[in-house]
Each structure stands twice: as C-alpha cells, then as structure tokens.
Image (tube, rainbow, N blue to C red):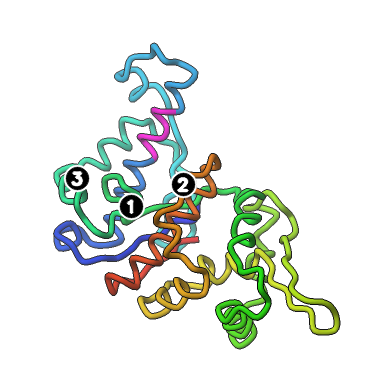
Amino acid sequence: MALDYALKFPCEVRKNVPEAKLVALVGYMNLAQFAVAEIRKSNPAEPLETILGKYQVHVNQRRPDGITEQVPMNIEQLVTLAQPISQYIGHCTECRANIADCPFGCIAKINYPIRKESEEWLLSRLPDDMKNSNLLLLLRFLSDLKIDGHLVDAMRERLFELKKPLTRHWGSPPNQQQITSSQIIEMLAFGGNVGPQQAGLYTKLFGLLSVLSEQHSPSSNIEQFKTLMCAIVMSGRLNASISFDV
C-alpha cells in the first residue's frame, strides 16, 4: 500500500497514453521490479524465468462500482500488463519532470506505513525562530484553511507507525504556537491535488528549494518524502499540477 502521486507534465508519453492508464501501467511495472528485487534478496540464484512464473503478488484493482480489491497475479502477468509503455522509457531520461530519476519518474509514491523518522524530519524542517516570516505565514495558512490534521489522524491506525502525531511548539503560554506532523502531511499530500500556484506557496513556506541539493537520508521513507517535495518544487517551475491517490 502506498500514497501514489503524479506530476502531470505534458510530454510525448502523455500524448499517446491517457493519464489514468499511464499511472496504472507504471504501477504494474514498478511492482514487478520491486517484487523481483525482494525475491532476489532471499533467493539470489533463482532464475528470472522461474521468478516471473512462480511467484505471485496481490494487485489493487478498482471495480466498476468504485471498490478496490486485491487480485493475485504472478510477476510475469505484471510485466505483460506494463509492456505497452516500454517503448516510451527513453523519453524520460532528460525530462525535467523526472523527479524520481527513473523511467516514468514523474509518477512516484510514499510507502505505508509512514514512519516515525519521517514525521520527525518534517517537523525539524520548520524554522526555529517564532518570528520567522514563513513560519508566521504557515501558521496563518493552517488556521485560515482549518487544516487541523484530523484527516490524517483518522488514518493512523492503518497507515502510520505512530498512532498519535508529533508536535512542535514555539513560545510559551498563553501565546504558545504549535504545529503537528499530521497538519504538515495533510497539507502536503492528503488535502487533494496541488496546483502550480499552491506548489509555489508550499515551496516558500517549507523552504523546499534546499531539498534538491540535500544528501540522501538512510531512511527510504524520508527519501520518498523528499521526492514529493521535489515534485512540489517542479510543479511550480513547470506549471504542472500534482494529483494524489491516497
């Protein structure tokens, strides 16, 4: 399970493959690659042909009535389903929207469960100074739009390592201010699609430009959040929206 998103930058691939189909086929391709890599860890000598035909994974598929169910498939079936987009892989190498630095890297994900270290990292990026103009603007933004994090908290039991959000405080009572990790995650990823102007605002509020040059974290979950932040930066630069599938 994952939070899936796409930076919808017009390109040669999207001219030929409808968005919903593209996202689905990339999902099949990535799942097949991930499954093969995981099987290789415990069975390094297993022939690829055996892996493709022998091992099964469960794939989320949405029925006509809108309900998502898990369907078992072997890895070879996934590879076959993803085959129609293999001809377009070369188009992604130099694409400015390739935020994940891989084929079809404008489509990425954050794996569940969302880890404690990711929530700590998100809060640590906020300014220390309570008078910082970006922090003051962020506090007002959260208040005006009533982003209280409850939407995220309702999903914690299923999708998060922590069952309660982390909180960061500024100042002392009675004028103390606070922001929770749930508020940040709701704002960035669970509040619906993000347009270019919104992405530009988020880039300013969270100082996201620095993410582009930061060193890699040992946490894969933090790296996935960093990729999302890169997508937000590029959304503003490329005038392309980001769509989410929670």
Q: Which residue is mark 3?
A: 89
Query: Which stretch is magenta?
Result: 31-37
Question: Residue 231 appears at what percent x and percent y?
Answer: 38, 62
Mark 1–mark 3 Cα distance, whole angstroms, equals: 15 Å
Q: State if disc 3 and disc 1 touch (CB < 8 Å).
A: no
Residue matched to label 2: 215
Q: Secondary structure at mark 1?
A: helix
Going by the numbered disc 1, the residue's amino acid type is: Ala
Task: Report which residue position mark 1 lands on.
Answer: 24
Is the C-beta separation of discs 3 and 2 under 8 Å? no
> Identity of the amino acid at label 2?
Gln
Image spot of residue 51 (x, y percent): 37, 21
Residue 36, given in percent of the width and then of the height, sits at: 39, 28
Tell me, yes or no, whether the highlighted magenta stretch contains residue 121.
no
* Disc 2 and disc 1 in contact, CB within 8 angstroms: no
The residue under the point 83% across, 77% down is 172
Q: Nearer the viewer, residue 33 or 80?
A: 33
Where, by quadrant of the figure, is residue 198 drawn? bottom left
- Cα–Cα gap, marks 3 and 2: 27 Å
Q: Residues within 10 Å of mark 2 (few under 14, many from 20)?
A: few
